[in-house]
């Protein structure tokens, strides 16, 4: 009977390469005719996002946009606060050796630095750097020999192994709605100056055949009231949730993903008294989730037959193994000096921020993350000629988390999320307290020899020259090595020697070998 091989296809996702590139941003924008001249720029909020990704030969082409919101004081006598919005574009090629069309790519972008200055009272300029990162993944697959069927008694050495396998990827749109009613102790809405959104308390759950995603969205609104210099603040924390179908998913699997704010729309409505006291906000968030699992398989490490000679074809494969994923939180506190020492801060109107990873490394059993908290605070001051002021500061921070088993030569991926940011007046400075959550994913490359084919060779089995041999166990010997060396079935060797635990044989121990092959 010829050898019959039962094969299994192994599919996995392999990191091909990653790289970063900087976009130098230089642009000028004109103040719309409906707005007054610029006297002083108080705050710039720049939010970059990726809108298109194309993987090419050895490079990735990325298109993105930046949404700018600028708060400025007008040149008029009352120094009224105004806001203006712009949209900028950027493109870049990121070199990733070996990349090809239709390969998977994950990309993200962040503001490394962005400044805003006014060229003249009707024109402002943006200058800064947008850092873009591309990570190209390659879908790999190969067939391994799972079982060998033959009429003769073939001995198989199997060991369990696990491979991180991507089950699938799902994308969905989450819609959040907020209905804000302005209380009577606050002025009605004249115009919206700024709407800021911070996604926090992200959660991804994999259940039977589905992926559930939800996140809270903290909406912070500043608006102008009836009086020219009245600046008011509103907030709402809403839960947005979505359920997406994924065939083959179950609760034992893990989900990793991103939440990206797509757009924010608002509508001011009048109440029963005809006053503009109702603000409806609709938020669209795109969720992109990959679901993975550790697939456990029994791999044939070795094989032999007492009745025939086998030739095994092995091939070495490299694949990523996820060592562990850890999530944790840290608190960052700082006191920031005010912008103009001649003014005294009275109260904080708005505090917002962003976090980014600046460096990451692994040491023994630990991950060290370095990050940067970018803070913008708008606050009221005790100055008749200037009702509000603002500061922008960068606060570096470092924290360490335990990752049992982590080694310095492993790979570490880290993401930071701003859960909350509180701003307050403290001893003439602006105090901030931020809660930052982090997610670290530690992985390493594993080399593994897999049997991809087995051939039966028409060589004669060596003749036995002795009916019984006494063998002295050598250092490094195993029952499998001894049985294969003398080409006898494992069960025969175990039975003849009355061995209860074949994993526990000692060097120098005597074993009876029922027959010996001439090697």
Image (spheres, rainbow, N blue to C red):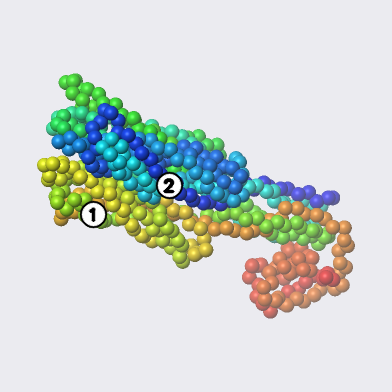
Label 2: few (<14), some (14–19) or many (≥20) C-alpha neighbours in 10 Å: some
Residue at numbered disc 2: 24
Task: Give the camera-side residue of 476 and 26.
Answer: 26
Task: Give the camera-side residue of 293 and 396.
Answer: 396
| Residue name at image x 39 percent, y 50 percent | 112
| Residue name at image x 62 percent, y 56 percent | 318
| Residue name at image x 32 percent, y 50 percent | 374
Q: Residue furthest front?
A: 120
Q: Is residue 201 visible?
A: no
Q: Is residue 173 visible?
A: yes
Residue at numbered disc 1: 336
Locate residue 459 relative to residue 71 in the image: left or right.
right
Residue 398 percent coordinates (x, y): 36, 60
Residue 344 percent coordinates (x, y): 14, 50
| Residue name at image x 38 percent, y 47 percent | 128
Q: Quadrant of the C terminus?
A: bottom right
Residue 412 percent coordinates (x, y): 48, 57
Say above or below: 288 vs 315: above
Locate residue 242 relative to residue 336 in the image: left or right.
right
């Amino acid at each position: 009977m010829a050898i019959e091989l039962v094969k299994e296809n192994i599919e996995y996702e392999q990191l091909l390469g990653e790289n970063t590139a900087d976009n130098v941003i230089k642009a000028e924008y004109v103040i719309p005719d409906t707005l007054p001249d610029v006297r002083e720029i108080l705050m710039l909020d720049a939010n970059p996002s990726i809108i298109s990704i194309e993987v090419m030969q050895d490079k990735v082409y990325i298109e993105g946009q930046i949404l700018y919101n600028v708060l400025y004081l007008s040149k008029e006598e009352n120094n009224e606060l105004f806001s203006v919005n712009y949209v900028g574009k950027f493109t870049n090629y990121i070199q990733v050796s070996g990349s090809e069309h239709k390969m998977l790519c994950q990309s993200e972008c962040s503001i490394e630095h962005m400044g805003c200055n006014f060229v003249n009272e009707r024109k402002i300029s943006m200058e800064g750097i947008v850092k873009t990162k591309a990570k190209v993944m390659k879908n790999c697959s190969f067939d391994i020999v799972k079982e060998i069927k033959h009429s003769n008694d073939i001995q198989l050495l199997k060991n369990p192994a696990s491979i991180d396998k991507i089950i699938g990827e799902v994308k969905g749109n989450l819609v959040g709605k907020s209905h804000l009613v302005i209380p009577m102790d606050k002025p009605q809405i004249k115009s919206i100056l700024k709407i800021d959104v911070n996604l926090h308390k992200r959660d991804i759950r994999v259940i039977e055949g589905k992926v559930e995603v939800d996140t809270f969205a903290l909406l912070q609104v500043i608006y102008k009231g009836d009086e020219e210099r009245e600046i008011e603040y509103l907030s709402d924390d809403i839960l947005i949730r979505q359920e997406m179908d994924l065939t083959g998913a179950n609760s034992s699997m893990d989900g990793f993903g991103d939440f990206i704010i797509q757009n924010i729309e608002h509508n001011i409505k009048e109440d029963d008294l005809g006053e503009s006291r109702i603000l409806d906000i609709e938020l669209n968030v795109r969720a992109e989730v990959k679901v993975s699992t550790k697939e456990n398989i029994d791999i044939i490490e070795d094989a032999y037959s007492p009745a025939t000679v086998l030739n095994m074809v092995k091939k070495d494969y490299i694949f990523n193994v996820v060592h562990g994923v850890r999530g944790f939180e840290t608190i960052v506190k700082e006191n920031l000096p005010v912008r103009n020492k001649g003014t005294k801060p009275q109260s904080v109107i708005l505090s917002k921020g962003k976090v980014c990873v600046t460096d990451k490394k692994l040491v023994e059993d630990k991950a060290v993350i370095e990050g940067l908290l970018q803070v913008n605070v708008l606050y009221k001051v005790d100055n008749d000629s200037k009702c509000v002021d603002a500061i922008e500061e960068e606060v570096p921070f470092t924290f360490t988390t335990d990752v049992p088993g982590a080694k310095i030569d492993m790979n570490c991926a880290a993401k930071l999320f701003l859960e909350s940011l509180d701003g307050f007046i403290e001893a003439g400075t602006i105090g901030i307290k931020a809660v930052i959550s982090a997610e670290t994913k530690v992985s390493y490359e594993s080399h593994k020899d897999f049997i991809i084919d087995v051939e039966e060779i028409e060589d004669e089995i060596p003749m036995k020259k002795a009916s019984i041999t006494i063998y002295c166990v050598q250092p490094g010997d195993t029952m499998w090595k001894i049985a294969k060396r003398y080409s006898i079935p494992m069960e025969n060797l175990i039975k003849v020697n009355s061995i209860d635990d074949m994993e526990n044989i000692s060097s120098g121990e005597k074993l009876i070998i029922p027959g010996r092959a001439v090697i």
